[in-house]
Image (cartoon, coloured by chain):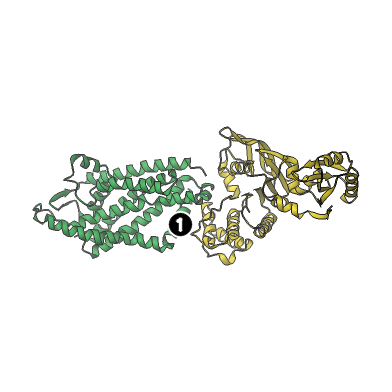
């Protein structure tokens, strides 16, 4: 069995009367990419700040790389790399100098620093920017430089707090490639995100976190499969009655009513179920205006477990579903 | 023993020499003080005090040389007092985050910044002494080579302690205050009494008793006295005032500055320990 590199038991944290983290327990295995997925304000950053010893632990216990974050903060700090949510590079120093500084504050010997800087500039494709001032880099490059900096000391765990927030999709996807590359080197990655695709594409395991609690943990496919095989969105002339009727069908696992459409999770192959559904509704005198089929996404997983949509990123995912039929009157 | 403070020092120095505008202005500023203010004032002072009889049997020191020591003290005061401002910006733009999240002890951050301040102060001191000699400032008059070396070393030591004290003070304010305007106004407010209730530019002998009393505790006075002791000797007269510095006087200057620096160091350590990210 792989060993746990992060172990968290009954972690609680409050700001005044506000409970930001509510009795959380989880483990992260060595070498995996583990994501905290949740909306802003869910408590993700608080957990990351406690694990990186930037915030004092209030209740519960947490160990990183075998060290207690409360009692052995120095050893924890030596074991980790951090990419903060906000960019924090020294803009008036060059790419190489930013890395050099980081190596120096972690007391890396000169030879090692030089070697590591060369390696990391290659890894993050910043070789030809070595002597460029950080302020002259593009947003994506700055992030990559921060990534390189986080890896400077060859940490056992790399923490990333919302690493791609505010980036366009191309930049984000490139970033994911770098992270996969880093994972291959054996670094464990703990990341927080509120982007569904990010958690989905990147993580070995995901914890969905909301209101300071972990709602469910698993790998992306497991989470999605739990929901059912397929998902149908229907718009009908009477959603309320249609929902009643559909709930009585054996193949239907669950029906949720959205503002405009019905979200139907089914446990069997959609190609057989869909004609059944359409026939049944027509028979009851309900017109179907739109049909939309897709595989459950992380977005659906999130909605399923939290009962609400994650504000960002869901619009696009919905559109990605295959629109197979549009029935007009 | 760890040397992480060296990283902080290194970064500050790299940036000091990189930004030519900052570098240039910090180097040219002492020259301007001495060149413009110094020459202008020394002419008027020398004219005004030409009627005052000199103290007999004591070497007379011209005003420019007297003031030169004060200019060093003042220049070093201003640059160190405002030196902590970088910390405030580092904090504001989350630059400090990386360092605060690392295993570097907080004391090393303070020490690193302090040492880079001392380096800059040394550079300025050398410039003032060098340029001052050019325009007729009579430092180290009649000293042998060894005596000059000892005098320079003494000045450097005092300048270093003084600079550290004010950088710690400035750093403490910087890390406590959030906005640049607030920092600016506090520093200006602080620099006023420090500057005027001191003997940096004029003798304090004719001050009202109360101000004279206060000025004795002013680090700027202590530094100016110390520099004069090393640069001008222990017995001279300027503008009719007779100056005698005893070993006890210089000891007091030294210990006073040391005390000031230590108090400021503990204030800085205390504040830095509380800094949250």
Query: Horizontally, is B8 left or right of B44 in the view?
Result: right
Does residue A20 sit above or below B57 in this rendering? above
Question: Residue A219: image x %, image y %?
Answer: 75, 47
Q: Secondary structure at mark 1?
A: helix
Question: Residue A102: image x %, image y %?
Answer: 53, 54
Question: Residue B82: image x %, image y %?
Answer: 37, 51
Q: Residues within 10 Å of mark 1 (few under 14, many from 20)?
A: some
Question: Residue A161: image x %, image y %?
Answer: 61, 48
Does residue A322 sit above or below A68 in this rendering? below
Query: Horizontally, is A60 left or right of A94 in the view?
Result: right
The residue lying furthest to the bottom in this view is A128
Label 1 resides on the chain identified as B
Residue B188 in sight here: yes
In depth, the one of B114 and A316 nearer the eye is: A316
In depth, the one of B84 and B252 nearer the eye is: B84
Say which quarter of the image contains residue B209. Answer: top left
Does residue A37 sit above or below A183 in this rendering? above
The residue lying furthest to the top in this view is A17
Q: Residue at x 30, y 61 (%)?
A: B127
In depth, the one of B135 and A277 nearer the eye is: A277
Q: Which residue is mark 1?
A: B10
In depth, the one of B143 and A60 nearer the eye is: A60
The hue in which chain A appears in the rendered picture of the protein: yellow
Query: Horizontally, is A131 left or right of B132 in the view?
Result: right
Please give the letter of the chain rendered in green: B
Residue B3 in sight here: no
Q: Residue at x 59, y 65 (%)?
A: A127
Q: Residue at x 77, y 42 (%)?
A: A257
């Amino acid at each position: 069995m792989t060993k746990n590199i992060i172990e968290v038991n009954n972690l609680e944290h409050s700001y005044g009367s506000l409970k930001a983290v509510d009795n959380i327990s989880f483990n992260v295995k060595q070498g995996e990419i583990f994501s905290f997925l949740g909306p802003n304000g869910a408590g993700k950053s608080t957990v990351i700040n406690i694990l990186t010893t930037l915030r004092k632990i209030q209740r519960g216990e947490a160990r990183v790389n075998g060290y207690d974050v409360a009692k052995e903060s120095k050893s924890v700090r030596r074991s980790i790399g951090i990419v903060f949510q906000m960019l924090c590079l020294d803009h008036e120093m060059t790419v190489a100098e930013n890395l050099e500084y980081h190596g120096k504050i972690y007391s890396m010997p000169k030879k090692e620093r030089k070697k590591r800087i060369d390696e990391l500039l290659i890894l993050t494709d910043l070789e030809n920017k070595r002597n460029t001032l950080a302020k002259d880099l593009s947003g994506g490059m700055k992030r990559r430089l921060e990534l390189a900096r986080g890896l400077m000391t060859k940490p056992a765990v790399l923490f990333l707090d919302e690493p791609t927030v505010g980036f366009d999709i191309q930049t984000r996807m490139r970033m994911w490639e770098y992270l996969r590359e880093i994972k291959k080197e054996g670094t464990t990655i703990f990341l927080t995100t509120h982007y569904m695709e990010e958690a989905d594409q990147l993580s070995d395991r995901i914890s969905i976190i909301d209101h300071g609690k972990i709602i469910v943990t698993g790998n992306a496919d497991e989470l999605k499969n739990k929901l059912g095989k397929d998902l149908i969105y229907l718009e009908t002339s009477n959603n309320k009655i249609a929902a009643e009727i559909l709930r009585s069908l054996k193949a239907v696992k669950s029906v949720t009513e959205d503002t405009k459409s019905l979200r139907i999770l089914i446990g069997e192959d959609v190609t057989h179920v869909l004609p059944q559904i359409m026939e049944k509704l027509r028979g009851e005198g309900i017109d179907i205006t739109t049909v939309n089929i897709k595989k459950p996404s992380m977005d659906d997983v999130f909605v399923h477990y939290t009962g609400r949509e994650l504000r960002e990123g869901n619009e696009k995912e919905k559109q990605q579903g295959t629109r197979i039929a549009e029935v007009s009157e | 023993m760890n040397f992480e403070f060296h990283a902080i020092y290194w970064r500050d120095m790299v940036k000091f020499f990189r930004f030519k505008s900052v570098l240039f202005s910090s180097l040219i500023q002492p020259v301007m003080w001495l060149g413009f203010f110094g020459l202008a004032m020394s002419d008027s002072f020398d004219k005004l005090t030409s009627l005052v009889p000199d103290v007999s049997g004591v070497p007379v020191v011209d005003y420019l040389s007297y003031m030169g020591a004060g200019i060093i003290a003042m220049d070093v005061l201003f640059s160190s007092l405002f030196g902590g401002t970088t910390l405030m910006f580092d904090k504001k733009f989350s630059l400090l985050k990386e360092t605060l999240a690392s295993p570097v002890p907080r004391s090393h951050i303070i020490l690193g910044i302090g040492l880079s301040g001392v380096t800059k102060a040394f550079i300025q001191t050398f410039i003032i002494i060098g340029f001052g000699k050019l325009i007729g400032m009579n430092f180290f008059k009649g000293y042998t080579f060894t005596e000059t070396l000892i005098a320079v070393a003494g000045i450097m030591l005092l300048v270093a302690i003084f600079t550290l004290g004010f950088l710690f003070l400035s750093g403490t304010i910087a890390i406590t205050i959030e906005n640049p305007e607030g920092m600016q106004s506090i520093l200006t407010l602080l620099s006023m009494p420090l500057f005027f209730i001191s003997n940096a530019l004029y003798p304090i002998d004719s001050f009202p008793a109360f101000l004279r009393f206060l000025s004795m505790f002013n680090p700027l006075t202590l530094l100016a006295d110390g520099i004069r002791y090393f640069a001008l000797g222990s017995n001279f007269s300027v503008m009719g005032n007779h100056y005698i510095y005893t070993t006890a006087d210089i000891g007091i200057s030294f210990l006073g500055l040391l005390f000031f620096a230590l108090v400021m160091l503990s204030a800085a350590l205390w504040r830095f320990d509380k800094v949250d990210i």
